[in-house]
Amino acid sequence: MLQQIENEKRFVTVTAGNLRQNHIYITGHHDFFPKDCVGGSNGRTTKGKPIVLELDGLAKQIVTDIPIDSQSGKPRRHFRARGLWRPHVSRRRHREA
């Protein structure tokens, strides 16, 4: 069962790269997420415990985890489910901050 935490929010800056690549960097925000949500380096390896993301303006919840970098073993700078940002970014017509 997924645990819901009320009123826990972080704001992130949307960059030109985010708009082009349809993902959001979480650099500097790893302390916000539970350590067990970090999984293996790719989808074929062990995934971390799922986390549910809710974005303002997107009706659909995004379930994902954070992969590790295969060379450094550190959490990556983005969520594993990168392609799921596309509807949110294009629908909201974000501009670079």
Image (tube, rainbow, N blue to C red):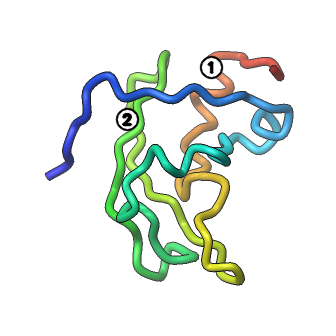
In the rendered view, tell whether residue 89 sits above or below residue 53. Answer: above
Q: CA distance from mark 2 to mark 1?
A: 15 Å
Q: Is residue 73 left or right of residue 58?
A: right
Residue reaching furthest to the left: 1
C-beta proximity under 8 Å, tags 2 and 1:
no
Residue 74, position as x, y percentages in the image:
61, 71
Depth order, front residue of 11/51: 11
Residue 70, position as x, y percentages in the image:
65, 81
Query: Which amino acid, by three-letter code, is at mark 1?
Result: Arg
In the rendered view, tell whether residue 94 sits above or below residue 42. Answer: above
Identify the residue at image location x=67%, y=48%. Answer: 27
Where disc 1 sits, the SS reads: helix
Depth order, front residue of 4/31: 31
Where disc 2 sits, the SS reads: loop
Q: Residue 33, labelled with which disc?
A: none
Depth order, front residue of 42/37: 37
Per the image, the residue denoted by label 1 is 91
Q: Is residue 13 left or right of residue 31?
A: right
In the rendered view, tell whether residue 42 sits above or below residue 86. Answer: below
Q: Residue 61, labelled with which disc?
A: 2
